[in-house]
Image (cartoon, coloured by chain):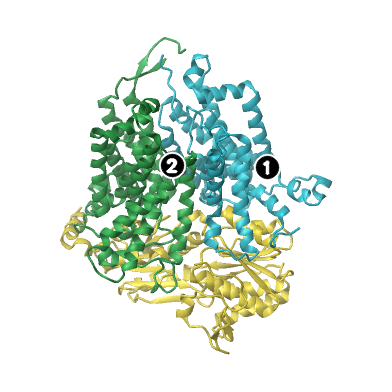
Amino acid sequence: MVMLEKRPNPSRFWTAATPVLAVVLTMIAGGVMFAILGKNPLEAIRTIFWDPLFGEFAWYFRGQLLVKAGPLILIAVGLSLGFRAGIWNIGAEGQYIMGAIFGAAVGLAFYPMEAWFIFPLMVIAGAFGGWLWAMIPAVLRTRFRTNEILVSLLLVYVAQSILSSMALGALRNPEGGGFPGSRNLSQYPSAANGELIAGSGMHWGVVAAFIAVIAAYVLLQRHILGFHIRLAGQAPRAARFAGVSPNRLVLLCMGISGALAGLAGLFEVSGPAGQISIDFASGYGFTAIIVAFLGRLNPVGILLAGLLMALTYIGGENASTNLGLPSASIQAFQGMLLFFLLAVDLLSNYRLRLSNRETA
Amino acid sequence: MMLGGINPAVLIASLMVAAVPIILAAIGELVVEKAGVLNLGVEGMMIMGAICGFAAAVATGSPLMGFVGGALGGAALSVIFALLTQFLMANQVATGLALTLFGLGLSSLIGQGYVGIKPPPTARLDLGPLSDIPVLGTILFRHDVMVYVSVAAVAVVWAVLRYTRTGLVLRAVGENHDAAHALGYHVIRIRFLAILFGGAMAGLGGAYLSLIRVPQWTDGITAGAGWIALAIVVFASWKPWRVLLGAYLFGGIAVLQLNLQAAGARIPVEYLSMSPYLITILVLVIMSADKSRAAAAAPAALGKNFHASR
Amino acid sequence: MNRRTLLASAAIGLGLSMTGAAFAQDKLKVGFIYVGPIGDGGWTFQHNEGRLALEAEYGDRIETVYQESVPEGADAERVLTQMALGGADIIFTTSFGYMDATNAVAAKFPNVKFEHATGFKREHPNVATYNARFYEGRAVMGTIGGRMTKSNKIGYIGSFPIPEVIQGINASYIHAKKVNPDVTMSVVWAYTWFDPAKEADAAKALIEQGVDVILAHTDSTAPLAEAAKTPGVIGFGQASDMISYAPSPRVSSIIDNWAPYYIERVGMLLDGTWESTDAWEGIGGGEVKIGEITDAVPAEVKAEAEALAASIADGSYHPFTGPLNKQDGSAWLAEGETADDATLAGMNFYVEGITGDIPK
């Protein structure tokens, strides 16, 4: 019978090989699904994985990959710190929304003035908005031991209500003919987060995502706080003996993840999305949780996982439009990819052994 | 009796109906979490239950078969989760979220032929003279059978966890799987069954939505009910009766805010629409701030995978 | 092969300003961007019906592509660009939130036509807008409701307080009041376009308040199903016909019928007469259809409603005809005066007699 034997250290070979294996398995399983739906499986797979990177219009999609992956990576990096320490911020979506509202409000307050300092102020306000929203579950947990999963999750819905109310009320575009939605920030030069190099997809949010990856890497490898975070997650009692204050860690991790989610929201609202609208939130905060775990809570892993997720979104859209696949099949396909990625991860942590021994 | 233009008896009766899907899904998830497994895929399992239940009911013409189908649909999806997390040691949080994504997609694919169809009606349970009792009759005895099933499910789960050997083993597995393993219990098998139960209950909750509550099939019909169920389990600090309390509280405020609007209360709608979430948080804070109670602790092994290493 | 290299070099040379259409195949390619899944049974479902009617009409001369569930904002811009790059000649964007994205992409693809539903911005000569006068249908529903109600209470389930919904509330109230001076109207805001359980709760809350006629401005059939549980309560199909609830509670319906417009506009593009316009048609143009009035409605009421619909259709009657006051009692329309389109399009006030405030 097949036995699993835990490896003392994750296998380097399999750590690199499993994602490839997972993608291949997904291609097979997804291909079967597409065939059942009456489409050419090879064409579908090619459209999803190949065309956005190397196809006819790759020059456009490569940039869009960064636009889509940027917020995912930025949020996921922040979340990964807390997840490592056993602090469960499930409400990044709410922090993302609040960051966008705070940042946009600052920008709109200055309209139509043009000045260099407006955008930096918006960035600060965005981070502050996300931080503030994350501080609610953090303080409730440290003060009253209230479970942060529940509070952060429910605050997403509250943030969505505030968002609708802002789009319909306080931040509504006075020249918008009574329709909901704020002025378009991307058309207001001092507040716009435009492309830094035309056609590249690079905007400040993508830059911030790369900086966050590097900073998190350095923090976890070199800094005492990173050590404390890892310790608190792996051995909470040992961490306490080492003088790590659990409350301080909660406030720090929630604060960092909230601020990064807020930044992601601000960069999105001032750039690609352009405006505060009722439907501004599109689930980045939740998808980022998947990205964080797919990346094994490792900053570099998150970078790659974010790009892969973005590829399935963009490639999936292409397949959906060009081949007439229902968007639901793309969702199911993404789910399969995640299943396989998570499943084959086994190989990097465990060794398969054939043995005659009975399990105990 | 009327309060501010709202009849409290009718309000209570409505909140009992509104809370059914959440109770069913949450009580299932509670068992899963008691066994030490965190399955964030409740939304996905619910919506699979909604479409499978709907399809089964339409095919057979029987609402009962619909609920069976719903439970099977939810359980079938949970098998994927169980295989991945219990045998392949996959991360539970990520697998659960992926399960939701997959369930939303798959349900929509299955449901393509069912848009705009009316399911066979479920009869209200006829309790004869009981339902004519003033006030109490309105509140308690004019419901469909699933309202009673939801309450019964809470009672059964409570009794099983508290008084039976099965419950004891389940809790042991959730608190300390290594010790349970050392005592000779099959940790993986117990968790697998708990996950299946959770899936079936979530599926049942979903089927209630598509067969009685709404009743119709549309894409995304659960509209986030699974997430609320997850929150309610935490709210309840993993205690069955508090699931009922939490779901009634949440469902009650959700219904009340609409009633207040319909009655013309002068409270701004945007505050009303966020009130169910805020009040749930507030109540939890008050309960968790009460230091005289034992700490509302999650099962110690929650979210941790088990591997019999020896 | 040739076409591909040609496209690629042109793309590099011209950046985004090139268009796939210039080199396109013989068939006209028509794209649709949907905000929800086709299976929503309401808004998106009806647009897709329009797309199918288009295919039936023109057969081999056109091909259609579509993308479901496109979030508003950055994603919409990408999907639009992708469709345009993929050789679409005309793209219909079927939600208000796509307004800025539509205009932004239209700037980059001057040879592709864009048609934006329910918006007002036409910043480029290749952008047209279209909408339907749903309030005309609401006027007919209000008439039926006013005649049918026994409790003299009509309920309206609103999604968000945007002009289109407020038009609907006002139009149905005015016409219910006209045939039944004792009528009052209760409005419940669901703050969602689509949440069947919540819509059912809203309907239930209204019924418990004694309402026996329910108008819904959200997308699902849940309010009708709820109405079906209480004898004597009636409702109307919304967006689609919802005929499975006939003859009661669904006594009639207001159907979004986009097929005539889509067929007309694509026809214009085929014979080269397309130009940027702002279309706002109602019952007369066929965009708003009144579903069959069932036998649950007395014959004279049915005749009255049909006469009203006919007079709106031939233009002899406008549902907003003075004398009408605003909610605060200030004069809005003088005797015989009709509302102008600009005021209607941005409608943000109730007419006199409706209680409650519009949420801000």
Q: Tell which of A70 and B99 is nearer to you.
A: A70
Q: The green chain is which one?
A: A
Query: In terms of image quadrants, where is residue A45?
Result: top left
Q: Mark 2 lies on which chain?
A: A
At x 31%, y 46%, the residue is A74
Lateral position of residue A289 relative to residue C318, left or right: left
The residue wearing badge 2 is A36
Q: How far apart are marks 2 and 1 (CA)?
A: 36 Å
Label 2 crowd bin: few (<14), some (14–19), many (20+), radius 10 Å: few
Q: Where is residue A314 in the image (x, y as percent from the top left)?
A: 32, 50
At x 64%, y 63%, the residue is B262
Q: Where is residue B285 in the image (x, y as percent from the top left)?
A: 53, 44
Q: Tell which of B274 and C248 is nearer to you.
A: B274
The residue wearing badge 1 is B146
Chain C display color:
yellow
Q: What element carries label 1?
A: helix
Query: In terms of image quadrants, where is residue C270?
Result: bottom left
Asked if labels 1 and 2 touch by Cβ distance under 8 angstroms, the answer is: no
Q: Where is residue C318 in the image (x, y as percent from the top left)?
A: 55, 82
Q: Mark 1 lies on which chain?
A: B
Lateral position of residue C127 relative to residue C311, left or right: left
Chain B display color:
cyan
Q: Is mark 2 on a helix, strand or loop?
A: helix
At x 47%, y 68%, the residue is C259
Please, which residue is most extreme toward the bottom here?
Answer: C335
On screen, C61 above or below B20?
Answer: below
**Looking at numbered disc 2 in the image, what kind of residue is underneath it?**
Ile
Lateral position of residue B48 relative to residue A24, left or right: right
Query: In terms of image quadrants, where is residue A229?
Result: top left
Q: Where is residue A53 in the image (x, y as percent from the top left)?
A: 24, 47
